Amino acid sequence: MTTLIGRSPAFNRLRNALSMVAATDVGVLLLGEPGTGKETLAREIHACSARRDGRFGVLACTGAPPDALDRCVSTLVQEGPATLYLDEVGELNAADQARLLHQILVQDSASDGTCSGSGLRIIAASALDLDRQVQQGAFRRDLYLRLCVVPLEVPPLRERALDIPALTEHFIATATARHGLDPPWLTPGAQRLLRRYTWPGNLRELANLCERLVILLPGTAVGPENLPGELVRGAPLSENDIAFSLPPHGIDLNDLEAELIRQALSLAGGNKSRAARLLGLTRDTLLYRLQKHLITS
Ligand SMILES: Nc1ncnc2c1ncn2[C@@H]1O[C@H](COP(=O)(O)OP(=O)(O)OP(=O)(O)O)[C@@H](O)[C@H]1O
């Protein structure tokens, strides 16, 4: 079974819904941006369902060859109770949509109507707004209604920022084990940037970053200066951040200084004299500190 990380309110609501649908055999449509964890959640539904001992098959609908759907369904059906996960179901062309509807109707007529785990269960996922596709005539309404008995919205990572520390720890531990390296650790300044970033690539982007840090900085401290530029640029300090009180667990003053210098340079468009003024420093003091933090601008 997968280790599902997440304790934010948004994720807890989803987790509850997952356990409810896992106890049934209804069609589930997972809706969420790329990398939000849709496949992982589908695997969890399968693992918690009556068909947990059967296969979990995956069909990537984007660019799937014409016979892929039929082959996938017949292989799974032959092997007993199974779950088929259709990734990006909105990308199926008209012919495949008709084939899928046909397969669902065949499965329904073969099913004994219980949740005992016979036949094939379909869990579909989409990053596209499937409802809009139906309205635009790009997706069959009859198929949509079959797939979407229970729609589940998977929140983007920016809406579950509370989960970022635990997910970061999990991804670092996973990459550390995979590569046989020592784990890096994040300074408070770096942790703060991770919490503030908007993560357009969601959990996959965070997992990739953690793996990169494990490979490039094993067993060392990771500060803001080691993080990609988009994380630093995407996290402007607000007035509240500047007028902050020292948290009980303390801060890393060195990292904070480096972060403020980067922010000032960015605000000043790279002009060092202006950046120095923003920080209440002389230009020479700023140059010294740029060297100290190995900041190149
Ligand atoms: N709750 C979770 N706890 C721990 N790891 C997770 C969780 N959800 C997802 N992941 C991890 O995040 C990464 C992305 O998840 P996944 O592939 O399930 O996303 P997806 O929404 O299906 O992506 P795509 O839309 O691009 O197919 C994977 O490495 C997965 O193992």
Image (cartoon, grey):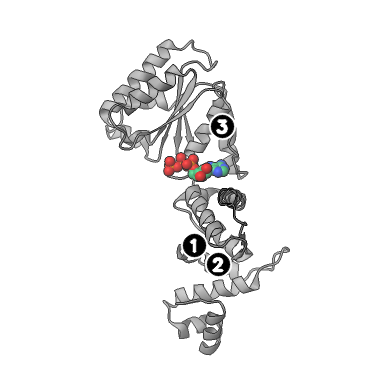
Three-letter code for the amino acid on which mark 3 is drawn: Ala
Residue 227 is situated, as x and y percent measured from the top left of the image, at: 51, 64
Residue 81 is situated, as x and y percent measured from the top left of the image, at: 49, 19
| Residue at image coords 61%, 53% | 165
> Can you tell which mark lies on residue 224?
2
Compute the Cα span from label 1 to label 3.
Answer: 32 Å
Secondary element type, mark 2: helix
Up/down of 159 relative to 215, above or below: above
> Residue 121 vs residue 16: left or right?
left
Q: Nearer the viewer, mark 2 or mark 3?
A: 2
Residue corresponding to mark 1: 231
Residue 22 is situated, as x and y percent measured from the top left of the image, at: 55, 26
Three-letter code for the amino acid on which mark 2 is drawn: Pro
Mark 3 crowdedness (10 Å alpha carbons): few <14, some 14-19, many ≥20:
some
**Residue 74 figure quarter:** top left
Of callouts 2 and 1, the N-terminal one:
2
Q: Nearer the viewer, mark 1 or mark 3?
A: 1
Three-letter code for the amino acid on which mark 1 is drawn: Leu
| Residue at image coords 43%, 22% | 76
> Can you tell which mark lies on residue 17?
3
**Residue 192 figure quarter:** bottom right
Secondary element type, mark 1: helix
